[in-house]
Image: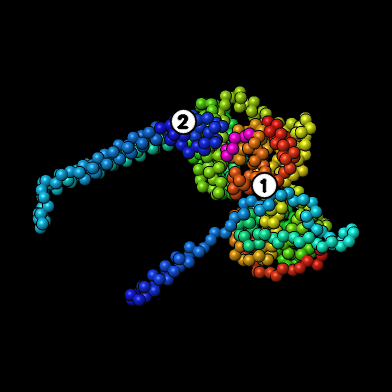
């Protein structure tokens, strides 16, 4: 039972975020609550129908024949037997129609409840977040009318508990799909088109979301951590993310910064507060504060960071990050620098 | 259909199936073969050198001219690194066009590699130390397919977004023009 409650969660990521982090059976908000009823109803009806069909099949297969089979079969009309068989078939059709109708009503009711949540949410000053799908990571932006207050991060979506969140999502390459099973349904990210999704998290916690539309080699390693936290902590997080990277204070990290700015990194990555302004890869301004590396593939530790920088293709073959053969002293300095970007 | 014709059709079909098992998917080079940094001095820009004349080091051939995946990757990098900013999808703007048959510094893979790595006068910056050499080789092969210097069937057939020029695969095949300058 417990094994399948985890769903398809990736074991390494589970170590980082705890149990039940990716399970539709463990809803953490009103949207998830709406779905769980429909899920249990579907499961109950399906199991009941399956058991009844198997019982009927076994009865038919194991029932003892009344008469030995004649060499010459006698085909004669049996009105009484045909009438009773007809009644059984009619009853089965009636039960099927009723069950499908129950499903239809339950499904429509769930859909209506879901939409009414959206209507209620739009009236309550939702948190707006822009998500852009890339092969194979998520770019997350907290828009603000003041450009200096905009926050760009990657693969980690922080939301306040008990407040509706509206995601405006698009993609730069192929179709991706956002799916945080604990928080509600899926929504596709489509290139050249903005899709909208509403959700609300009521229980604080870290929930794993997964790309749910096959998008290439590393589709399975395209995950997103949804961190639901109390409003005060969310505000503090947002304020910290708005700050540019603090300049390094010790000589090791200063060397790391020089390595970063002098190497291939800056063509794709940006760190606010430095000349690095590449927009191809994830923004690294506060990379040290994130839970995971490479879109939920690895826990964010010093060792994993080193392995990821030197040879990303062994962890995530096909990832667009190239290998970076750095000398070990440069590498240590670079990791200390990146780890300190909190 | 006669029985003989039916037998012939079945035999041809089975033969085609058997032949299809020989088809092999093109290798997709995710990792560069050598995990080494591109050291300065790898690219020779001049035959002039101090001291006695040493033999010029042989350059590797463009390793990806036959690989459709690497050329498509080069196309992605061409946009990602904003080559279009000056070369404008190969049609030329501030920088020279790349889809014609005029090559100031040669069209051989090693010439283009040197052009990207070391830069050229009047505007082409040097990308050495900014683009990993493996990615430069991908760009080299893509630049060559812009001009139709690679095989037609490995060149990209279409864009993922609006097409501003005919697809690379519809460019006529060109002959490589040897460099007049080192």
Residue in view at x 59 percent, y 35 percent: A299
Res A143 → quadrant: top right
Please identify the dominant SS of the magenta region. Answer: loop
**Relative to B81, residue A48 above or below:** above
Mark 2 crowdedness (10 Å alpha carbons): few <14, some 14-19, many ≥20: many
On-image quarter of the N terminus of chain A:
top left
Q: Secondary structure at mark 2?
A: loop
Q: Which residue is mark 2?
A: A27
Which one is in front in this view, the residue at disc 2 or the one at disc 1?
1
Residue A121 visible here:
no
Query: In the visual, does A8 lie left or right of A332?
Result: left
Q: Position of residue A70 (x, y in %)?
A: 10, 54
**Relative to A57, residue A109 above or below:** above
Chain ID for label 1? Answer: A
Q: Position of residue B154 (x, y in %)?
A: 61, 62
Q: Which mark is residue A323?
A: 1
Q: Which mark is residue B129?
A: none
Task: Give whichever of A65, B118 is nearer the camera.
Answer: A65
Give the magenta-colored segment's residue range: A296-301
Res A98 → quadrant: top left
Query: In the visual, does A34 lie left or right of A324?
Result: left
């Amino acid at each position: 039972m417990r094994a399948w409650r985890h769903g398809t969660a990736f074991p390494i990521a589970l170590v980082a975020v705890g149990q039940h982090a990716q399970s539709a059976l463990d809803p953490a908000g009103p949207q998830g609550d709406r779905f769980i009823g429909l899920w249990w109803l579907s499961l109950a009806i399906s199991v009941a129908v399956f058991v009844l069909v198997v019982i009927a099949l076994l009865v038919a297969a194991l029932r003892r024949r009344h008469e030995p089979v004649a060499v010459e079969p006698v085909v004669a009309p049996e009105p009484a037997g045909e009438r009773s068989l007809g009644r059984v078939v009619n009853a089965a059709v009636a039960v099927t129609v009723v069950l499908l109708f129950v499903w239809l009503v339950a499904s429509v009711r769930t859909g209506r409840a879901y939409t009414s949540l959206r209507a209620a949410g739009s009236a309550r000053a939702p948190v707006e977040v822009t998500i852009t799908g890339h092969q194979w990571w998520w770019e997350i932006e907290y828009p603000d009318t003041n450009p200096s207050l905009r926050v760009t991060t990657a693969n980690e979506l922080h939301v306040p508990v008990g407040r509706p969140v509206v995601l405006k999502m698009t993609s730069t390459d192929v179709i991706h799909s956002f799916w945080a099973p604990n928080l509600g349904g899926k929504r596709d990210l489509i290139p050249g088109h903005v899709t909208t999704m509403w959700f609300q998290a009521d229980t604080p916690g870290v929930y794993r979301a997964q790309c749910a539309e096959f998008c290439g080699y590393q589709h399975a390693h395209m995950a997103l951590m949804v961190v639901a936290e109390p409003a005060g902590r969310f505000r503090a997080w947002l304020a910290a993310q708005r700050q540019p990277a603090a300049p390094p204070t010790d000589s090791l990290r200063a060397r790391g910064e020089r390595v970063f700015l002098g190497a291939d990194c800056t063509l794709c990555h940006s760190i606010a507060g430095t000349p690095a302004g590449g927009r191809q890869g994830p923004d690294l301004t506060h990379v040290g504060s994130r839970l995971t590396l490479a879109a939920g593939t690895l826990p964010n530790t010093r060792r994993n960071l080193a392995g990821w920088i030197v040879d990303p293709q062994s962890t995530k073959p096909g990832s667009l990050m190239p290998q970076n053969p750095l000398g070990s002293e440069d590498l240590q300095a670079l990791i200390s620098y990146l780890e300190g970007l909190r | 259909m006669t029985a003989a014709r039916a037998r012939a059709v079945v035999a041809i079909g089975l033969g085609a199936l058997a032949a299809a098992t020989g088809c092999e998917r093109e290798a997709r080079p995710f990792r560069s073969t050598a995990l080494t940094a591109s050291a300065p001095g790898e690219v020779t820009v001049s035959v002039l050198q101090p001291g006695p004349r040493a033999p010029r080091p042989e350059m590797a051939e463009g390793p990806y001219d036959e690989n459709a995946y690497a050329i498509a990757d080069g196309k992605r990098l061409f946009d990602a690194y904003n080559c279009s900013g000056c070369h404008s999808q190969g049609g030329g703007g501030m920088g020279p066009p790349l889809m014609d048959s005029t090559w100031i510094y040669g069209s051989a893979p090693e010439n283009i590699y040197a052009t990207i790595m070391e830069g050229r006068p009047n505007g082409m910056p040097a990308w050495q130390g900014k683009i990993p050499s493996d990615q430069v080789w991908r760009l080299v092969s893509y630049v060559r397919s812009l001009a139709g210097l690679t095989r037609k069937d490995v060149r990209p057939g279409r864009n993922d977004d609006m097409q501003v020029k005919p697809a690379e695969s519809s460019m006529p095949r060109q002959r490589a023009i040897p460099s007049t300058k080192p």
